[in-house]
Image (tube, grey):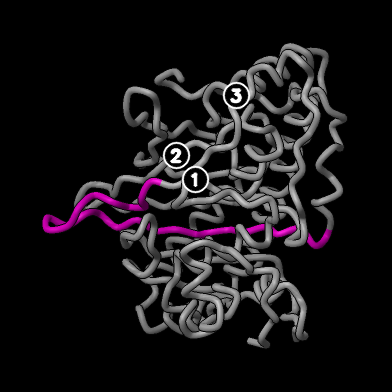
Amino acid sequence: MTDRLPLIDISRFRGPERDAFLDELRYAAHEVGFFYVVGHGVPETLTEGIFEVARRFFALPLEQRLEIENIHSPQFRGYTSTGHEYTAGAPDRREQIDIGPERDALSGAAGDPIWQRLIGPNQWPPALPELRAVTLAWQAEALRVSREVLRALAAALGQDEGYFDAWFDAEATTHVKIIHYPGRDTTGDDQGVGAHKDYGYLALLQQDEVGGLQVRGPDGWIDVTPVPGSFVFNIGEMLEIATQGYLIATDHRVVSPPAGVDRYSVPFFLGPRLDAVVEPLELPAELAARARGVSADAANPLLAHYGENALIGWLRSHPAVAEKWWPDVASGARKSGVGLTDRPATPA
């Protein structure tokens, strides 16, 4: 890995330089697992607009933010105050809103997969109604760009560019976080969010001008310096499974900004349908020879069933919500994930 992330112009995927572009994308995804994307066509009014509503929401009085606290949502949607999401067992110093697809909750029946209970509605703040429209418009654009990058990756891996499309229909699992990192205090550590990997296919990040994101390299942590007009993309665990480790999900973290400085970011996570089962794709021989195998980590087993992986992530990250709405599965699933699809669903 280099000490600077590659920069990829996704507009070249549909142009005369397609072959050279695919070589560059393949290198970035295989060697680094993180890269900047420009040429995406998302209007600046929307990228600026999402930060404007973010700042306005986090400036609301705490009691108005808590009106949509995620403890009210079996689907882990809504507001989380600072210190109430956990990464690697430690509280993160950030506050955020979690937003998913706008869908009705399923009633659930005995024998249904337990992860179906993740499907449901979002919570929106009454004090800031414009947040909903701006966020959903930004989410739609993030989905468009992420799908294009995934199609380009499929082509770079020697597949038809529509190889992954079957799992990304109207029931696909998208997830947006609108995040505020307050400046660090003098008594705590600098964990904005602890070291982790993302469990979907791809993650897209819009970050402001304040740095803090770091990627683990062979010789230490590499700063992901903000590049105006870009999104930061990284490989998720589902692509690691699909490519048998030709692509690897890379550890990353966020360091809290200095005292008196606020950082805002909006990540988008591209996940498939919850019933997706990731199967290894057939790589060209020259790529297969460079596959490194799927990571083996007893504390973070990678499961081919996407719904299981997603549920384990939520239960680990939000123990208070897990204990309120998922007591039948919370304790065991946070540890191993074994048997999630074998348990009967309990209506939330």
Circles 2 and 1: CB atoms closer than 8 Å: yes
Report the side of 257 relative to 178 (left or right).
left
Give the secondary structure at mark 3: helix
Residue 259 location (% of width, % of height): 19, 52
Which residue is the extreme one toward the left? 186
Where is mark 2, residue-wise?
A: 251
Report the side of 85 relative to 30 (left or right).
left
Q: Is residue 126 visible from the viewing direction of this image?
A: no
Report the side of 62 relative to 268 (left or right).
left
Residue 202 location (% of width, % of height): 63, 43
Residue 30's tag is: 3
Distance from label 2 to label 1 (Cα)?
5 Å
Q: Earlier in the sequence, mark 2 or mark 1?
A: 1
Q: Residue placed at 58% from the left, 75% from the top?
A: 129
- Is 207 one of the magenta-colored residues? no
Give the secondary structure at mark 2: loop
Distance from label 3 to label 1 (Cα)?
15 Å
Give the secondary structure at mark 1: loop
Nearest the eye: 66 or 127: 66
**Range covered by the magenta-colored residues:** 170-195
Where is mark 1, residue-wise?
A: 197
Distance from label 3 to label 2 (Cα)?
14 Å
